[in-house]
Image (cartoon, rainbow, N blue to C red):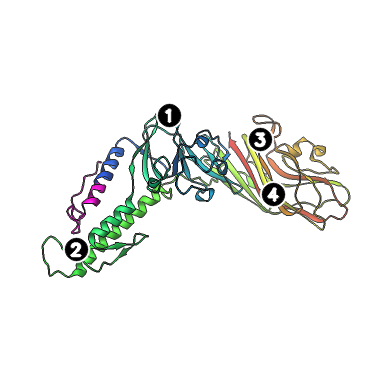
Amino acid sequence: MALSKLTEIPGTVLTRNHAPAFFDWLDTMTDKVNEVEGTSTLREGVIAITADAGLNAASNGDALSGLLSFSDDGGSALGIGDFSAGDFILSSNGASSKLFYVYSVSSTLYVGDADSSYAPDGMSALASGDTFFVANDLLDTTAAEELYSIYAFNGTALVKLGDVDYATEIDNLAGALGAVVDSDGNYVAHTTSNYIDTNSDVTEDLLDIDTQLKTTTDAAATNATAISNIIDGTTPRTGVITNTTNVGTAGTNVVAEEVGDGKHFVTTLTLTDVVIGAPNAGNNSAHGALIYTFPAGVHVHKISHFNVGLTVGTVTSDTPDAGLGSTEATGAQALLSGVGATAEDYITGQTWAVALDGTAQAAAPIGAVAGLMTGISLNDTSDAKTVYLNVADGWDAGVTGNLTASGTVVLTWDDIA
């Protein structure tokens, strides 16, 4: 339903004659809403729109820090601290324009589009008619970058519909009324009144007028907050869904967060002092800890990643071989390859390069050792469902106690049947 233009604010003494600049702006915004209302879909709130060539060419999984600062950011440049997981960025590139999603893996921010395995549930590629509130318009001149704006995609380009400088307009309204609105949009009582109501009753108590003005400015502040929440993505932002259907089972001292739609999953395992085993001091020995069991059925495993610290008593200078496998590592072996292929079929053994004092070492996101869509990656009903964190070494003679692990392991996979 189209909006009508106002000649006065209902329930108040404010008319177009009192604040013509404010009503002119209100007319413009009404036209923009009516322009969008019948033909467009209001999409996610966007933190920035840019024509930066690096972002235009970005691939799923590119680190956001490597794309900053954007080439058309002529104001106070946006830095990595201005972005959070869950933000959206518009890449203006004609018909090839894209909507990117910001996600976090091990505290590092990455970008991905609707085809990314990290894309939130319900996110779709740009379609003609999609409309966005944008917090930082980098396509505009430097001074105008502080203004919020509205952009729509027409199938061949992202087109600016207008600026949404509601904060300035609220200040204009307050000034016309002889009232003050602070930086948070809160009403501050005025000391003089410029106007009286339409019945021309000059003896009316100014406090009654003050009450009417407070109602108006409170409503304006509420609307400003609502618009701001849409623009910065607080509402309505398409979010990830924590899922409990078709999920696996975490091991001892492991907590699993399952994000997905019941078919496509990102499983984040948080390990806290998980006991891998007691190294055989002065000898070769291999050990493993069960950290996750996939549900029964058929699934496709895609990517594994870990960021884990290992701890052992007394001597911390050993450099063991550590990986992820579908079977537990055992026996008098110094390398996981000596145990067998299934002891490292998710992530092949990584030579530990940091002290065994809890300092974390990361394994970059990697497909199964045999390759994607083969071996353990194509997991049938009869295949192993278990995932072990395995370690092997020729241990120092001074090693004592248990070898433990703390950190995170991330698995991405799809449930097939």
SS type, badge 2: loop
**Residue at the location (26% across, 56% down)?**
173
What number is the disc on residue 195?
none
Label 2 – label 3 distance at C-alpha: 71 Å
| The magenta segment | 1-26
Judged left or right of residue 300, residue 54 is: left
Relative to 320, residue 195 above or below: below
Circles 4, 2 touching at the beta carbon (< 8 Å):
no
Label 1 – label 3 distance at C-alpha: 33 Å
Amino acid type shown at disc 2: Asn
Instruction: Residue 382: tell me if it is visible.
Output: no
Label 3 – label 4 distance at C-alpha: 18 Å
Circles 4, 1 touching at the beta carbon (< 8 Å):
no
* Mark 4 or mark 2, whichever is nearer to me: 2
Amino acid type shown at disc 1: Ala
SS type, badge 1: loop
Label 2 – label 1 distance at C-alpha: 52 Å
Q: Residues within 10 Å of mark 2 (few under 14, many from 20)?
A: few
Q: Residues within 10 Å of mark 4 (few under 14, many from 20)?
A: some
The outermost residue toward the left is 200
* Mark 2 or mark 3, whichever is nearer to me: 2
What number is the disc on residue 367?
3
**Residue at the location (33% across, 47% down)?**
164
What number is the disc on residue 308?
4
Residue position for label 2: 194
Residue position for label 1: 95
